[in-house]
Every structure is written in C-alpha cells, then in structure tokens.
C-alpha cells in the first residue's frame, strides 16, 4: 500500500518540481529562487543539461544549512556529469569527498567523473590534465592498476616535451602525481631527479640562486645524501659567503 501511494504521488511532485503544475508560473513570479529550481528540473527532464546546470548554479550560496549546501553541490556535480563537463563534475565531487569521504554516492560519482575526464583529456592529448584526472580516479577506485598504467603513459608524454623551465615544472607535477599513487615507481623517481637536476643547473647558469637552492633541496629530499645536491648547495653557500 505504501509503495502504491508513493507511485501515485510521484508524477504530481515531479510536475510541481519542474514547473509543469498549473500554479507554477505564479510561484516562479513570487519566488525567483523557486523559479530557478523549477527551471533547472524542467531542463533536466528535457535533456538540456547545460541549461539545467546554469539555472542550478545561480542558487549557489543561497542555502542556510550545511546539508542544503551539500545537496546543492551534489546535484551540480551530477548535472555537470550529465552535461559531459567532467572536469567541473570532478571539482564538485572532490569538494564533497573531502568533506564526506565515507559517502558512497560521492565516492562513486567522483570515480565515474574522474574516469571519463581522464579518458577525454588523454584522447585529446592534454597529457598533464589527464595525469591529474587519473590521480583523482586512483584515490577512489577499487582497483588502481588502470590509473597507474595510464598515468605513467601520460607522464611520459609530458616529460618528452620538457624543453624549457615551464614544461619541466609540468613534468615534475606529472611524475609527482605518478609517485603519489605508485610510491615504488622507479620511473617516477628517476623523472623527478632528472627534472630537479636540470632546473637547478639551469638556475645556477642564469644566476637565480633561490631557484637553484630550491631544486637542489628538492633533490636532496628525494635522494638523501645525493652528491649532486650536496655539491650544488655547497657552491651556493660558497657564493653567499
């Protein structure tokens, strides 16, 4: 009986929520907030997910309770996913996951959005962004092997184009992301070492002692007692003296 009553009530409730009830125009005029809510649900029913997300986003910050803000962000993340705006979905799901790591709705939403974002950016040759998305996916996926394999491949492409300081910093980020999900990766370790040595030596040649010291110190953290790093810091110390 209870199930039957719920089924009877579903259609009228959906009509009210999406603005198809005969009094909905009056409600929208009296309450712009409820007008936006109805517009968002109506656009979603019609498959116009970008417009549904746009209307829903205008309600951001209007909730007085933490639960209300949570529910708003959750729906925004789901709409972004439906609209194939996967990076936006990952951003919103990540915020919720940081606040509620035990919420299965959030974890599975983040997993799905990150996987699609990773595949999309990887297919487009956006290697660093793909690394970021695979790293997110690895945090919530039950099996991380897929993320490790793909992130390794993307990091290699980032490193291959590291022909200036800016791109070498991007390679550091890519190798660092791989190391964060695969601490034993020798390739990530060697990549990070090469990047820091390269940037430290270039900084010394350019007279940028602060940058050189920063990269030699980073190398020393990666490889305690590394002779290259110790010698580099000694040179900088002698220069300061």
Image (tube, rainbow, N blue to C red):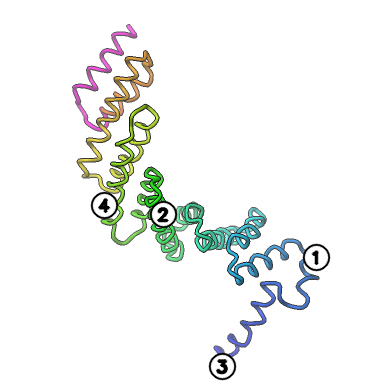
Comparing labels 4 and 2, the label whose residue is closer to the camera:
2
Comparing labels 1 and 4, the label whose residue is closer to the camera:
4
Q: Which residue is mark 1?
A: 29
User: Quick one: SS at disc 4?
Assistant: helix
Classified by dominant secondary structure, the portion drawn in magenta counts as: helix
Q: Which residue is mark 3?
A: 1
Q: Which residue is mark 4?
A: 149
User: Quick one: SS at disc 2?
Assistant: helix
Magenta stretch: includes residue 51: no
Q: Which residue is mark 2?
A: 120
Residue at horizontal 28 percent and vertical 60 percent from the top: 143
Position in image of residue 55 (x %, y %): 66, 59
Q: CA distance from mark 3 to mark 4?
A: 52 Å
Q: CA distance from mark 2 to mark 1?
A: 41 Å
Residue at horizontal 50 percent and vertical 61 percent from the top: 81
Q: Is residue 112 left or right of residue 39?
A: left
Q: Earlier in the sequence, mark 2 or mark 1?
A: 1
Q: Is residue 136 left or right of residue 79?
A: left
Position in image of residue 194 (x %, y %): 25, 30
Q: Is residue 184 left or right of residue 217?
A: left
Q: Earlier in the sequence, mark 4 or mark 2?
A: 2
Category of crowding for the residue at label 2, using alpha-carbon neighbours closer than 10 angstroms: few (below 14), some (14–19), many (at least 20)? some
- Which residues are drawn in magenta? 220-241
Q: Earlier in the sequence, mark 3 or mark 4?
A: 3
């Amino acid at each position: 009986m209870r199930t039957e009553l719920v089924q009877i009530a579903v259609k009228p409730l959906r009509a009210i929520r999406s603005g198809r009830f005969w009094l909905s125009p009056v409600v929208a005029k009296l309450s712009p907030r409820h007008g936006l809510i109805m517009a968002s649900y109506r656009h979603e029913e019609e498959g116009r997910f970008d417009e549904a997300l746009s209307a829903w986003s205008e309600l951001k910050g209007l909730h007085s309770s933490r639960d209300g803000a949570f529910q708003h962000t959750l729906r925004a993340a789901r709409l972004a996913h439906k609209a194939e705006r996967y990076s936006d979905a990952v951003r919103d799901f990540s915020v919720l996951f940081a606040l509620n790591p035990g919420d299965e709705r959030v974890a599975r939403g983040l997993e799905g959005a990150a996987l699609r974002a990773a595949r999309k950016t990887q297919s487009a040759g956006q290697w660093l962004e793909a690394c970021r998305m695979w790293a997110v996916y690895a945090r919530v996926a039950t099996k991380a092997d897929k993320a490790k394999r793909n992130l390794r491949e993307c990091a290699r492409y980032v490193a291959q184009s590291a022909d200036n300081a800016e791109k070498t910093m991007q390679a550091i980020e890519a190798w660092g992301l791989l190391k964060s999900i695969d601490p034993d990766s020798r390739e990530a370790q060697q990549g990070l070492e090469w990047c820091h040595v390269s940037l430290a030596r270039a900084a010394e040649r350019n007279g940028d002692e602060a940058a050189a010291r920063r990269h030699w110190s980073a190398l020393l953290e990666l490889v305690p007692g590394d002779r290259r790093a110790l010698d580099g810091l000694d040179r900088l110390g002698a220069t300061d003296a």
